[in-house]
């Protein structure tokens, strides 16, 4: 049986190959050396693979640093430098803790308890979902799929079908996991890991510092939830409290695994809040503590928990970080600054951030958020620093911009919620268009002003 390839996929393959080939035939000179050419050819090919999903993400991520070494673009110490940093290990630790909390049922118990307290009306259900989703994200990690599944179950229980009411439930759950990314301590982790080898160490803000620095983002999120309660209001009144109370009762008493997992989670959060007073490493501590779930005698984790973890994602994250490390070793940051600075000379910092926001919002139509972090973290941070802008501010601003989409395909994590089949395309585009407008107003009218007041905006 012949393998059928869709027309859309053929177009993706065409551009995936065409653009790197065009780059390859650009003549070399004193600045654009053969090393640099091969770096761009391989990196652009990989980013297009990530964006178009033309080849398996993990396979490309594994091959990329090996190609750099093979082609003489970088030494192994540079290509594999990200594996010596805390980012991949801290990310993996978070995935372990989240997997155990989900499998033992603690996440669902917390969610049902919160919803039982608030969800007595449609608006109450949305606010309850918002708090549950945001709380899971802030204190545990990004659990888009479990949260989407929880929201799907709520829609089925309330019999809302494919409707505005279902769209509100599903999308509020998704936004609780994604809109608040800049407010979480680990939100900028990947971008910092990519940029640091080139521009120098970029400190990671503490847990409470991240909340405070990015406080206007909470206002945006709460405004979006309020808007959803108005534009997605169901035709018939609903009462979800009885369902949530029943689900909570069905969970029964706390299991031994849940108690152990809760204790480890509390220890994890206490460590984050007290590391400044103990003198211990925040990043490596967060990488290490989740593995307490596997210690004999504690037994909160099972073999299946570790088997279900997406280790390929860690390889992908580290490969993206490697792009920044190799780019720095080739001096690309300095070259780009020399090219762009004359254009921005005499311009205000608002112009820089406007260009950053527009660039990333537009590129989101053809690139994934992680691909954009890989491609733009180093150049944007380098240019911003040359203008006297705090690199942390550049990165936190980036997290706002890459979340701006109109269509589900633009961001796989929003696509997860859309894929359950309860959201009409028109409803999706409506709230995402509103979200884009509210974010633009928030970052330029509130966030940048807030950063100036706090002294966070400039170096």
Image (tube, rainbow, N blue to C red):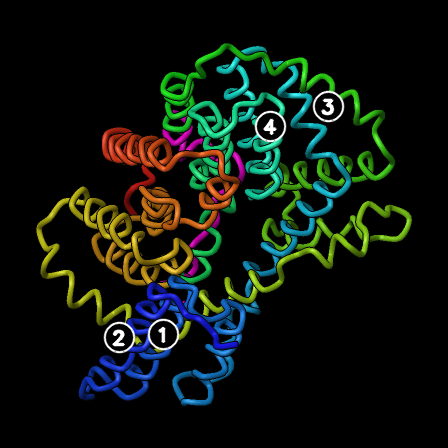
The residue under label 3 is 247
Count of numbered tags: 4
Label 2: element kind: helix
State which quadrant residue 140 falls in: top right
- Which of marks 2 and 3 precedes in the sequence? 2
The residue under label 4 is 156
Boundaries of the magenta span: 196-219
Compared with residue 29, is residue 104 higher up or lower down, i.e. above or below? above
Q: Nearer the viewer, residue 407 or 362?
A: 407
- Which of marks 4 and 1 precedes in the sequence? 1
What is the magenta segment's predominant secondary structure?
Answer: helix
Density class for disc 4 (Cα within 10 Å; few <14, some 14-19, many ≥20) is few
Q: Nearer the viewer, residue 191 or 427?
A: 427
Label 4: element kind: helix
Label 3: element kind: helix
Residue 202 drawn at (x, y percent): 42, 55
Disc on res. 45: 1
- Which of marks 2 and 1 precedes in the sequence? 2
Calculate the distance from the C-alpha at mark 1 to the C-alpha at mark 4. 42 Å
Q: Nearer the viewer, mark 2 or mark 4?
A: 4
Calculate the distance from the C-alpha at mark 3 to the C-alpha at mark 2. 53 Å
Compared with residue 249, is residue 176 higher up or lower down, i.e. above or below? below
Label 1: element kind: helix
State if disc 4 and disc 1 touch (CB < 8 Å).
no
Compared with residue 15, is residue 374 higher up or lower down, i.e. above or below? above
Disc on res. 19: 2
Can residue 218 be found in the magenta stretch? yes
Calculate the distance from the C-alpha at mark 1 to the C-alpha at mark 3. 48 Å
């Amino acid at each position: 049986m012949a393998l059928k390839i869709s027309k859309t996929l053929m177009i993706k393959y065409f551009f995936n190959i065409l653009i790197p080939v065009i780059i390859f035939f650009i003549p070399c000179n004193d600045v654009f050396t053969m090393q640099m050419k091969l770096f761009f050819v391989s990196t652009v090919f990989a980013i297009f693979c990530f964006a178009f999903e033309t080849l398996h993400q993990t396979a490309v991520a594994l091959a990329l640093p090996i190609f750099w070494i093979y082609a003489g673009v970088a030494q192994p110490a540079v290509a594999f430098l990200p594996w010596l940093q805390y980012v991949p290990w801290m990310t993996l630790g978070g995935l372990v803790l989240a997997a155990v909390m989900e499998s033992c049922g603690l996440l669902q118990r917390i969610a049902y308890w919160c919803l039982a307290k608030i969800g007595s009306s449609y608006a109450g259900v949305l606010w309850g979902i918002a708090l549950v989703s945001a709380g899971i994200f802030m204190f545990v990690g990004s659990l888009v799929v479990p949260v989407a599944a929880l929201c799907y179950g709520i829609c089925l229980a309330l019999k809302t079908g494919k409707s505005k009411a279902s769209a509100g439930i599903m999308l509020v759950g998704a936004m609780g996991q994604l809109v608040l990314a800049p407010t979480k301590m680990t939100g900028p982790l990947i971008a910092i890991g990519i940029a640091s080898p080139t521009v120098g160490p970029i400190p990671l803000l503490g847990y409470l510092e991240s909340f405070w620095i990015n406080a206007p983002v909470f206002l945006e999120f709460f405004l979006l939830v309020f808007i959803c309660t108005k534009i997605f209001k169901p035709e018939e009144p609903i009462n979800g409290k009885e369902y949530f109370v029943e689900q909570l009762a069905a969970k029964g008493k706390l299991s031994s695994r849940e108690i152990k997992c809760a204790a480890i989670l509390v220890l994890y959060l206490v460590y984050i809040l007290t590391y400044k007073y103990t003198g211990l490493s925040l990043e490596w501590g967060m990488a290490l503590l989740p593995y307490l779930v596997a210690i004999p005698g504690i037994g909160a984790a099972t073999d299946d928990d570790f088997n279900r973890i997406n280790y390929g994602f860690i390889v992908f994250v580290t490969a993206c970080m490697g792009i920044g490390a190799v780019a720095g070793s080739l001096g690309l940051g300095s070259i780009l600054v020399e090219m762009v600075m004359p254009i921005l000379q005499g311009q205000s910092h608002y112009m820089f951030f406007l260009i950053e926001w527009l660039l990333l919002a537009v590129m989101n139509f053809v690139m994934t958020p992680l691909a954009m972090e890989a491609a733009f973290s180093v150049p944007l941070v380098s240019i911003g620093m040359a203008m006297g802008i705090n690199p942390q501010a550049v990165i936190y601003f980036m997290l706002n911009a890459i979340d701006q989409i109109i269509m589900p395909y633009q961001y796989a994590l929003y696509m997860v919620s859309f894929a359950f089949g309860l959201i009409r395309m028109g409803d999706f585009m409506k709230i995402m268009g509103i979200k884009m407008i509210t974010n633009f107003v928030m970052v330029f009218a509130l966030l940048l002003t807030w950063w100036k007041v706090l002294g966070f905006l400039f170096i």
